[in-house]
Amino acid sequence: MAEHASRRCCLGWDFSTQQVKVVAVDADLNVFYEESVRFDRDLPEFGRRSQAPPGPASSGRLRLLPAQSAFSGSPRRTRGGVHIHKDGLTVTSPVLMWVQALDIVLEKMKASGFDFSQVLAVSGAGQQHGSVFWKAGASQVLTSLSPDLPLGQQLQACFSITDCPVWMDSSTTAQCRRLEAAAGGAQALSRLTGSRAYERFTGNQIAKIYQQNPEAYSNTERISLVSSFAASLFLGSYSPVDYSDGSGMNLLQIHDKVWSQVCLGACAPRLEEKLGPPVPSCAAVGAISSYYVWRYGFHPGCQVVAFTGDNPASLAGMRLEEGDIAVSLGTSDTLFVWLREPVPALEGHVFCNPVDPQHFLALLCFKNGSLTREKVRDESASCSWGEFSRALRSTQMGNGGNLGFYFDVMEITPEATGRHRFNAEGHEVSAFPRDVEVRALVEGQFMAKRLHAEGLGYRVVPKTKILATGGASHNRDILQVLADVFGAPVYVMDTANSACVGSAYRAFHGLVAGTNMPFSEVVKLAPNPRLAATPAPGAAQVYEALLPKYAKLEQRILSQVQGPPE
């Protein structure tokens, strides 16, 4: 790729659960370079003996990588980029693994002939809810990095917690309940921070570390999210947390964009000084560290634009605008909604919008996605997607009033399990005809998404468009049902690297954000999505009538699962 590597460009990084990846995007918004390092494949030494870094102190002897963790009983091997602990609830990742992965990617880029001097700005994304704990004195190391040595060698002693909690961790239920009580209840906390207390959210993880490892907490001078940690590596000093990723912590007041004193106090002492003040997601936080100028040839004026979470970065990569929806149809189905006036609730999340600080991003996750669709395909469509599509085409919108709920695993939204089928009269039945079953599944999945999105403040407006991604977005008949249920056109585009590409777009935006140029203007040259489906005539009337019925049946299922209210 060396012959293509001398274009003026921005770099978009993604520090995800399983890899570190980078793309280069030129001024015409074309991706012309990409590189990655997969943790399990390229850094297998994390979790087992490895060769010491070269240098006179190593003498070729084997050493054990540091194994101190936020929690006791830390396992020795990463799988999928994480350590899953014996309790099955605690999940962490080695922070030095992320640092060394960055070293490897940069060295690969250098070896390929990539022209770093043409990079105008860098930005990036990090897996949301992960956190990094910088040891007292680490800031001095960051500001005095030697260009003769890799980052991993220089930062080994910079972390008070070397195995850090990530989004898969679910071990902080006690801390969640304490935080909700301090805020006046789950709904009050949601109104304040955009979400009720969730085990993976950073405030609750910090509270657990403070309670279980107070010495390490006391020896921490700065707490970063994975995103702001990665930005700090490029900045050569501590980068602030941005509003969008910060709103996934249960600590940030999403309307005022300041840390909540009530929430900080419920989690740990002196927390505000360890977090630093948050900044807008489009903020340029400084010039790149001289380390990268001397070691790799970056231009000294290259800017670092605040890094954000992977979900907000994906919104930028998909170029959503006000009123738009993105639906990822994968193993789990995820819904992103751009909102002006959100209604935080006990389900889903509301984050600050990464490209417009006056607006918001709502996120809903549904566990029963593609695996459930595949099961129904196998049971009712002869294991054939062609038969599955034929069933959708041969049945009418609204399915004759037959409605289905398919929760093969415990669902997140709503919290329910099992399969529940109801006929047009609202009576529960044990089975549907095969074609009716297929449509009931797909219509039910999309009605649930619309219903719960509306619970967070979503409303269809004339310019609303839906961007569909993930495996099921290749099935036009599924997309037709999506368009019909939501009453909006559905588009598709290649979003395989949406977090990386969105980060590069955000880097360009950060260069001009001070001029108040909107993000949509910055990315107007980017490839346009392709129209895949438009609502059929009469669809709006069919589903406007069915949605209230669906909502009542969902409440009936929940009351059976949870029992009557106290």
Image (tube, rainbow, N blue to C red):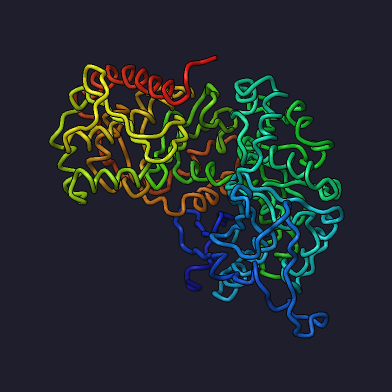
Relative height, residue 76 to residue 399 (above, below): below
Relative height, residue 192 to residue 529 (above, below): above
Q: Position of residue 365 (x, y in %)?
A: 46, 37
Residue at the image point whose x is 44% and y is 56% from the top: 30
Relative height, residue 497 to residue 559 (above, below): below
> Which quadrant would the C terminus be assigned to in this image?
top right
Q: Position of residue 557 (x, y in %)?
A: 38, 24
Q: Position of residue 479 (x, y in %)?
A: 27, 39
Say which of 5 and 330 sits in front: 330
Say which of 37 and 534 sits in front: 37
Q: Is residue 345 visible?
A: yes
Which residue is at the far top?
566
Determine whether, in the image, residue 368 is placed left or right of residue 246.
left
Q: Which of the 4 image quarters holds residue 270?
A: top right
Q: Position of residue 330 (x, y in %)?
A: 39, 47
Q: Which of the 4 image quarters holds residue 547?
A: top left
